[in-house]
Image (cartoon, rainbow, N blue to C red):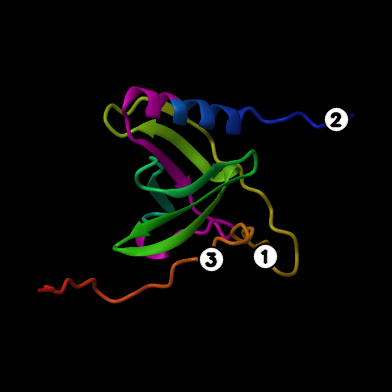
Amino acid sequence: MVAEISTKPYLIRALYEWCADSGYTPQLLVAVDGRTRVPPGFVKDGQIVLNVSAGATRNLTLDNDWIQFSARFGGVSHEIAIPVDRVAAIFARENGQGLHFEPVDVPEPPGSPEQAPPPPPGDAPIPPRGKPSLKVVK
């Protein structure tokens, strides 16, 4: 018997497109777990809200199992990887319209915890640099 395919990733992609087409800022509410790769300093009460607009992300992929992109937090670039089953909501920042989902707790197999997939080849993370500075050239 073939396993039923979840509608959740399709709904996430549809709401993302609706936000973009309407000029709204798509945001994800994520229930963070050990498989979720986000900057820990921005997690509050086990959750994080992420701006996933085209202007806030780089190399955004909305796959059936994972949402991945690069984004800056406090001026530092981070590689973000979110299992789709940990997305609690996708909504427009401007009006709050969107969809809420119940995150699914996936048991981690015994032994080493599952790691987020590596970034695509040729997409090395940008190393953090010091504070930017400008110099007057005459």
Which residue sits furthest right?
1
Query: In x, y percent, where is residue 118?
Result: 62, 61
Q: Mark 1 points at which residue?
A: 113
Crowding at label 3, few (<14), some or many (≥20) Cα neighbours within 10 Å? few
Q: How far apart are marks 1 and 2 (CA)?
A: 27 Å
Compared to residue 3, the image places residue 107 above or below, namely below
First reached walking from the N terminus: tag 1 or tag 2: 2
Q: Nearest to the eye among marks 3 and 2: give it.
A: 3
Q: What residue type is labelled 1?
A: Pro
**Which mark is on residue 2?**
2
Q: Which amino acid does label 2 sit on?
A: Val
Taking depth in this image into account, of 23 and 136 the one nearest to the observer is 136
Q: Magenta residues, as a range?
A: 18-42
Residue 98 counted in the magenta span = no
Q: Are marks 1 and 2 in contact (CB under 8 Å)?
A: no
Q: From the viewer's perspective, tell me whether residue 49 is left or right of residue 12.
A: left
Residue highlighted by disc 3: 124
Compare marks 3 and 2 and give the one earlier in the sequence: 2
Q: Residue at x 61, y 42 (%)?
A: 104
Quadrant including the N terminus: top right
How far across and down, in percent of the image, does residue 6 sit?
Answer: 67, 31
Q: Percent position (x, y) of residue 97?
A: 36, 25
Q: Is mark 2 on a helix, strand or loop?
A: loop
Residue 103 horizontal/vertical position (percent): 55, 41
Q: In this view, does 32 lie above or below 90?
A: below
Label 1's element?
Answer: loop
Residue type at tag 3: Ala
